[in-house]
Every structure is written in structure tokens, then in C-alpha cells.
Image (spheres, rainbow, N blue to C red):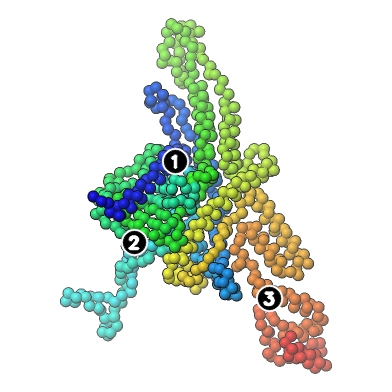
Amino acid sequence: MAKTPDKKALDKLLTRIEAAENWRDRNYKDRWTKYYKMYRNHVDPIMDPESRKPVNDRSNISIPYPETMLETTLPRLLETMFASRPYIKCIGVPLDFSNYEMYKDLKPWEESAKKMELLLDYQHNVVFDLRDKFHTGLKIAGLYGTTVAFTGWRYKERGVIRKELQQVMEPANGIEEPMFEADGVTPVMDWQPVETTIKEYDDPEVEFLDLGLFFVDPNAVDVEDARFAGHVQHLPKSKIDEMVKFDENLKVNWKKVPKEAKKNEARSNRQSAIGIPMPDDNTVFQHEDEDLIEVIHYFEDDRYAIILNRGFLARDTDNPFWHKKKPYDKDVFQMVPHEFYGRGVMEMLEDLHLELNTERNQRIDYRSFSMRRMFWARRGACIPRSQLKWRQGGIIESDEPDDIKVMEAPEGNVASSFNQEQIIKKDMQDVTGAHDVVMGTSGRGETATSTMSKDNNASLRFKMLISSLEKRLLVSISRKMIQLNQQFIEDVRMLIDRDQSADQWPQITPEEIQGEFHLTAAGSSVEPMANKEAFKQRMVELYGMVAADTFMQQFPVKRRNMLKKVFEAFDIHDTEDLLPTDEELSGVIEQQVLGQFLSQLPPELLQLLNPFLPQPGGGLPEQQALGPPAQIGGGANTAMSQEQGMQMTGAGA
């Protein structure tokens, strides 16, 4: 029987997907399982080489130092990347030169950039918590060396019951009729429960994927140059039906979908390796409609396919996203040139961790054996072996004094073992850059110069890593979110801010967020903490000197720019609301010039002009409309001064 076009396309896609999965599992599955066990601090039992039975009389503990290194590095990365909001700065740019020439006076791209920046910040912090998602993503990178993020769009509706004010109905002759007040005209109203549908979610979604559920072209070095990539989900039938409802290109015939309950094999394999087997789904859900369905999402730059249970092609269309790219972004903890997957903290510390465990277990075994003494017993001495055990108030019966002697334990040089352990831990810190000063401690007897040097070296390593994470993940994900916002937002969005009143909530229309933008990460600088504190102090002192200098007092614009640098030293980059604008500053300068001019006038003339000068609150004083100013000095010969005052009033003084 000839294959249908859908069957041929399905077979071709499955061949490609399974080849990528087999290559991934063959080369990385065992490694990732091993790193997972290191993170969970799980060790396999010691097996006797001859009997193949577990050995229980030897120490077999694991020191969670790799976990310590990872959990020390992770907060520093997160705190630096998400030190200030908004996380992304948008700079609007014209579409081309002709667009610039046409609108260079209005510059509408600047207003569009402000609107998009507001929308991104709202989605990053209110719609979902981007910082929390990056916490997961960076931990995956530290564990396995690589992390992959999926950025898409999700729409979800939900049925709810709410109370609404409606007219009360009463049954009459088997028919519900409205109730009225005594006047027969006014309807009786009451709050009644009403079923309705609300839009629960209509925004971008960002998820960091399980590497065991992500597949990519085996010959690719990055997502951009991969010929294909995709990931696997496990969803119940109800979720897939909901996807079909809002996606006209997704067609599902459940009669043709293989009836086979699936489970997350990647997670199951990891947990089984540490003794936590996954439960059988059939024992939890008894109906086949509640079984999990394996959903494979397959992407090329110009193609998108969905496969259910590896037997039904539910969708095979063009890429639905306008950016026409695979919706994945990848970065590594430590890059391996010309390879897709990188190295993580666990791989860096694998051998050192084994050495540390061996050193600690050998020391424990020595102490255990040294406390369980051995004895010299003369052959033929009638001493029961049960008496040769150390016990409280124990007695050993002997005929001769030399029938038994204690065998001394060999010298184990335990002190040198402690020194060796410290050397191993220092090697681990050197490999990861997480020295004592990064962990919040300092070595005993270290000088301030030595501590500062270590902090500087660690910061240089973190700076390179954070720069890569910002460029390849934070900025790239935000760019995809911008493109999705421009594609899918079709109505006015109100960004609810609990810190502001309702009339101040920003409103954004689809037209206001169109255009091209340059994106930059607005995270904190990755400087050593000691250096940053010293730099802050120097900037504050410098601004104090500038503000007090009589020469610099003549240039308020320069002082404002200096104050902006002080704010930036404190990682405050959004200074537009804190510093005066050019218009506000020009008004201040005019006030200062007028004040200097008036300070040089005689007191009599200054008092004469005072009623006609602008007051601090703005506008002219009430005295100007009430007639001539009060007399100066005595009551005689004031006509001349009054006349001068009226002349100045007419001149607009």
C-alpha cells in the first residue's frame, strides 16, 4: 500500500528527530545523569569486586562542595543581570534614511521605544517573573553546561462564575418571568451567579527547557545555524484540545493518534538514578482520556510541525512567527569552541570532587579502624574471642601476662590529610572563580591587597560570562518578545501598576509599539564589591567638591551631568525622573541670573521693584494689580520714585 503524503512527511520528520535524539543520548545522557547525581550529592554503593555485594563497613560519603560552588556563583550572576528595572533598554531607530528624513522633527521612534520598554518591563515582572525563570535557566547551565530557552506566544481562556447585578426571575406556569416592584414598572434586581469566559493569558511565554527533551541538528554549533531544532512536551488530551481550539492549522483526529500513555523519560531516568522511580501513570489516572500525550514541536526557520505520540502529524505548516526564526536561544556556562554543548560547574569539578571524597572517606576509615583495636594473642592461650572486644568494665581472663598484647594502629598522618583537603578545595575555587571573598568569607591571615586581587580576578571571569548571558539570552529573548508583541497584540493594553493611581496607568496601542529598536541590557556593572563601594565614596566626595566650587556653580548643566554619574555609580540608570529636564534647568538658570542682577541693586530700588518680580510660586504678585507700591522712606517727595516704578512696569520689568 502506497504511503500518503502525510505519512511520508511524518516518517521523514521522525527519522530526523530520532537521529538527533540518539546522538544526544549517546554522547551526553550518561554525563548529565552523573552531574545530576553530583548535585544531589548521591553516591553509588561500594561493591565487593569478588562477591559483587555492597560493602557496608567502609565510609562512602560525598562532600557537597560542587553544589556549594554552583550556589555561590548563581546568585552573583542573577543579582548582576537583574540589578535594576527595566532589565532591557529600548532605543528607537528609524526604519531607513527616507523614514528619518520624513520624521526627523517628530522622531516617533523615540516614543515607540518608551512604550515598548514599558510593555517589556510589565511582561518581565507582572505577566511572568523573568528573574525566576533565569534562576532555573542558569542553574541548568551550571549543572550541565548548556541552557536553552523557548520563547513563544500563549493564549488561554478560562470559564469562571461571577456575581452580576441582574433582574430576578420567578417561575410562573412553567415559564420564568421577570419580577417587578409594587409599582409594576421597576424591575427587581439582585446579584446572581453568572457563568462567563475570561481571557486568562495572552502574552509571550518563556520557558527554559529540559536538555533531555530538546533536540537539535547534530552538526550545528548554535541554534542560528541549525537546520532544525525542537522540543518535547507531555500534555493531557484536554490541553491539546485547547490548543486546537485556538489554532486553525492544528488538526487532530484522535482515532488515528496511537493510544499509548507517555511519560517524561528524561526526568524519570534522572530520578531513577538516585532511587526515586517515577510512579506508573495508570495507577493515578484510570481513564485513557487522562493519559499524557507526547507532543513533539519541530522547527525550521520556515517550517513548524507538531507530532503526537510519534504516530500522527497534527500540523505541518510555515513558521507562524513573523520573525521567521527558530524560537530557541542557547548559551553555555563555559564555551567549548565549535561545539553546541558547553561545560558546567559539575564537569569542571568532577575529578576534584572524587579526590575530595576519597580524602575524606580515607580519613574516616582510618579513624574507625584505629578505634577498633587488634590484639596479639599467644597461640594456645585459652582466651575466649568474645572477651577481645573493648567494652565498659570489660575483663579478659589470662593465665600468663604475655598471653595478649594490643597491636598499635599505624601512624596515618591525619594532619597532612587535612592540609590536602584544603588544597583540593582551593583548586575547586580556582577552577570556578568562586574564591572565599566571593563566598562572603576571606582566608585567615590574608591581606587586603590579596583579597582585592582575588575579587578582581573573579569579577573578570564573571564579567565575561554575564556579558554572554545578557547578549545571547536576555537581549535575544527580549527581542523575540518584542517581535511577538508586534505580531499578536491587537487591542489596547492597560499596564496596571499598584504603586500608581488608576488614572496614571499607562495605556499602549498596537500602533505605538511598531518599529525597530536597539536593545541593551541594563544590569549592574560586574565590579568587585570592595571596588564598587570605594568608587561610590569617591564619586560622592567628587560631587561635593564640584557643587561647592564657585566656578562650577556658574554651570548648572555640568553639575547635573556630574550628579547623573553619581546615580550611575549607585546602579541607578533610570535617571530621567530624578534629574531636572533641560526646560526645568533653563528656568533655574534664569532665576539665578535674575537673582545675581538684583543682588547688585541698591536696597531702595530693590524694594521698589519687588512687587513686580516673579514670585517662587510663579506669576506676578497681587500688589501689581492693586495700584502703586508703598512709599519708601518718609511721606514727602515720592512722586519721582512712583513715576519710575510705573515706567518700569510699562517696560515689562
Q: Where's residue 545, x and y in %?
A: 75, 61
Q: Which residue is mark 2?
A: 249
The answer, for residue 225, to whether it is visible in the render is yes
Res. 546 image quadrant = bottom right
Q: Disc 2 or disc 3, which is closer to the eye?
A: 2
Nearer the N terminus, badge 2 or badge 1? 1
Q: Nearer the viewer, mark 3 or mark 1?
A: 1
**SS type, badge 2:** loop
Residue at which label 3 appears: 587
- Point out the tag, 2 or 3, that comes first from the N-terminus: 2
Residue at the image point whose x is 44% and y is 34% from the top? 43
Amino acid, disc 3 = Gly
Q: Are marks 2 and 1 in contact (CB under 8 Å)?
A: no
Task: Report how many numbered discs are placed on residues in the image.
Answer: 3
Disc 1: which residue: 28
Q: Residue at x 59, y 49 (%)?
A: 464
Q: Secondary structure at mark 1?
A: helix
Percent position of residue 95, x then y: 54, 68
Left or right, 630 with respect to 494, comes to right
Residue 597: percent from left, percent from top: 78, 78
Please tell me whether residue 307 is drawn above or below residue 495 in the rendered image: above
Between disc 2 and disc 1, the foreground one is 2
Q: Could you tell me which residue is drawn at 58 percent across and 24 percent down?
A: 413
Q: CA distance from mark 3 to mark 1?
A: 66 Å
Q: Which image quarter holds the C terminus?
A: bottom right
Which of marks 1 and 3 precedes in the sequence?
Answer: 1
Residue that appears at 53% across and 16% down: 408
Q: Position of residue 119 (x, y in %)?
A: 49, 65
Residue 279: assigned label: none
User: Taking 2 as reference, is 591 above or below it?
Assistant: below
- For the residue carrying disc 3, how many other residues have a C-alpha within 10 Å: few (<14), some (14-19), or many (20+)? few
State whether residue 650 is above or below residue 474.
Answer: below
